[in-house]
Image (cartoon, rainbow, N blue to C red):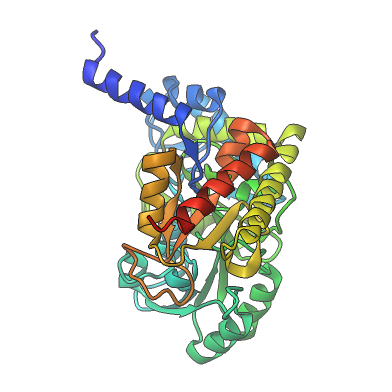
Amino acid sequence: MTFCPRLGNYIDSEIERQETSHIFIASENFASEDVMYACGSEFTNKYAEGYPYRRYYNGCEHCDSLESYGIDLVTALYGAEFANIQPHSGANANLAVFKAFLQPGDTILGMDLSAGGHLSHGASVNISGNWFDSQFYGVNRMGYLDYKDLREKAHIHKPKMIIAGASAYSRQIDWKKIHDIAKEVGAYFLADMSHYSGLIAAGVYYSPVPWADVVTSTTHKTLRGARGGMILWNNPEYTKRINSGVFPGTQGGPLMNQIAGKVQSFYEASQSEFEQYAKDVVDMAKYMCEVFKENNVKVITGGTDSHIILIKTDKKSGQQVADDLETFHNIIVNKNSIPNDPRGVWETSGIRIGTAAMVTKKGADMDYFENIAKTICSVIHDES
């Protein structure tokens, strides 16, 4: 069989782009060769609707062993009692949880997109915003999560579910405080740890697992695994409804090849060297923040506790800075709104930076991260 030459060209070009670019997209990382091999393995060929030892197809004995082992690994990694590793993405994991616990029209309370929240937490352009009465909490004038605002909104709107987690929030999230607020109003608490899950696995960021009713996550980003999602929980009474929310509620057959890649990434995250990687990710992000501040670039909240850095682009739009960084310096970031952003979402007044991918690629090379930060500063300040 002949390999498609155009496809080969696309793959070669993407390999070259990834090898030569400085990738600072906060939601991206470099999966290991072992993870990528597992994703392309013979598990690609197998349908396995259902769950281990309860499949709708024959010939699933190895799928059963694989998925069961993955569940054992991930529950041990995060200290959870139960897990579902079938979701195709983090957004699919959230959708399955909504299906399990909510009815259309129920009220949910999530972090506002403009404050750093995620589309799938109730944004009007997402199915979560179409299905539910979506209310939002935000950040204070310093850019920190506003727990007072969250509590007030919870008591006003009496949501059935409070959602925490973010795509552009750099600081620690106090999961216990949100747990306590949810209990005050009788709400379920969903924690979406997608961005922080690798840091949480390594113990360098607070874990929501002891506090949330349900935890969702992607399996790439800081966890640097196969692209996909997962769900964790501790209450056995939730097991049937969550599993049914995934299949048959919102998905058909699981992607067993992606589950194979997830299993490899869970294994890698359980190794001692992963802890050093996660520590380096946070240390390099903190170091870049200091360089930005020394060069008069505003860092939202004044720093970071994670891999994420959100900075203000001043006179230039975030779009212009991101485009100039890619065009002239091969540094890949994304434009991002900042709190109280006067510009629209297609321009923005900030950029989001993430250190995980380049720590995976380069390690904790302080000179490298300093040079990248200084280059970003020069592009922001350049008035030509």
Q: Is residue 307 visible?
A: yes
Residue 122 locus on image (x, y percent): 40, 70
Going 58% across and 61% down the picture, which residue do you hit? 214
Image quadrant in which you'd find residue 119: bottom left
Task: Please count the marks in the image.
Answer: 0
**Left or right of 172 on screen, residue 215:** left
Going 55% across and 53% down the picture, which residue do you hit? 195
In this view, the residue farthest toward the bottom is: 156
Task: Reply above or below: 108 against 17.
Answer: below
**Left or right of 344 on screen, residue 65:** right
Q: Nearer the viewer, residue 27 or 194?
A: 27
Q: Is residue 244 visible?
A: no
Residue 54 locus on image (x, y percent): 48, 39
- Quarter of the image with the C terminus is bottom left
Going 67% across and 64% down the picture, which residue do you hit? 172
Residue 31 locus on image (x, y percent): 53, 32
Residue 179 locus on image (x, y percent): 66, 73
In this view, the residue farthest toward the right is: 272
- Quarter of the image with the N terminus is top left
**Left or right of 40 on screen, residue 216:** right
Q: Nearer the viewer, residue 238 or 367?
A: 367
**Left or right of 280 on screen, residue 23:** left
Task: Reply above or below: 59 against 131.
Answer: above
